[in-house]
Amino acid sequence: MRSRALAYVAAKARGGHEAGLPVTLHFHPDRSTVDGRPLLEAMAEDGFYRNQFETGTSNGGLTARPGGDRWHWESRMFGGAYDDAPAAERPKYGALNFRRRPTGGAPRFGSAHFRMAAHTLGRTTFCYPDSVLNPTDFGYGTRVSALIELAARDDTDLLDDYIEAHVHGPVDLAKDVEALVLDPSHRGAEFVELGRSLAEDGHLDPRVLGAARHLDPQALKRVWHYVARFGALP
């Protein structure tokens, strides 16, 4: 099924090749799993980065279920290759860091990221814009120049300035990840007010938000979007 999905996207990819651009998989390291374990600790114990069909959580939409929106988007993008696949076989989502930002390719989806090892590009596909928007432009492996040109021409908000990546197959943290990148703060209307109430002496960063993980996760996600959008230089 993986080879079928890759071949389907490869046939639609266009443009030239761009080597050396990292793919980043984003997450909030201090959030919890559905069974209450700290996320980073759970990933360290498990040894794998898992998709939202497996975890039941997401920093984007929460429609990863049979017949849900995410299921339909993947069916469309990958030619139905994963329609009957086990959850673990489905792709893991990230972004191509074509602007080489230290915060990764798509900081709206998390303050931390795994930078993928180069060998995983052979099973990585891309689209622009985000799959929620039913894209028609795709890339595969290093064949991403057309997507970069599209993204560079687009006058989009910083939060939406990313090329979506799909890493097909398991993501083994010991073999497939080159680096774990954490925000420096991890050393040592409604959503605006929530942000103000969480801030320490007027300061709001990923560490402060992590300490508030007992609050509504969807509200915290929106607050993080404000931090990611306005709290750092591009």
Image (cartoon, grey):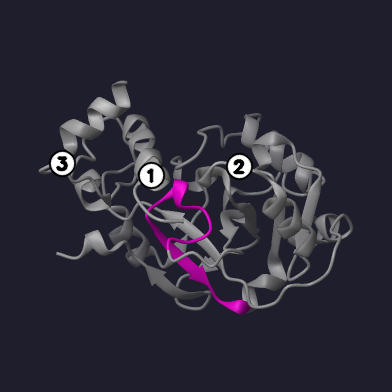
Residue at image location 32% in from the left, 59% down from the top:
40
Magenta part of the chain: 103-118
Q: Position of residue 166 (x, y in %)?
A: 64, 56
How far apart are labels 1 and 2 at the CA level? 14 Å
Which label is found at residue 202? 3
Q: Amino acid at mark 3?
A: Gly
How far apart are labels 1 and 3 at the CA level? 14 Å
Q: Position of residue 95 (x, y in %)?
A: 58, 57
**Residue 69 in which image quadrant:** top right
Task: Say which residue label 2 marks.
Answer: 156
Q: Are marks 1 and 3 in contact (CB under 8 Å)?
A: no
**Residue 77 in which image quadrant:** top right
Does 217 sit left or right of 80 as displayed?
Answer: left
Residue at image location 74% in from the left, 36% down from the top:
134
Q: Position of residue 84 (x, y in %)?
A: 71, 43
- Residue toward you, 90 or 9: 9
Task: Say which residue label 1 marks.
Answer: 230
Residue 116 falls within the magenta-colored stretch: yes
Q: Quadrant of the N terminus?
A: bottom right
Q: Amino acid at mark 2?
A: Thr
How far apart are labels 2 and 3 at the CA level? 28 Å
Residue 226 falls within the magenta-colored stretch: no
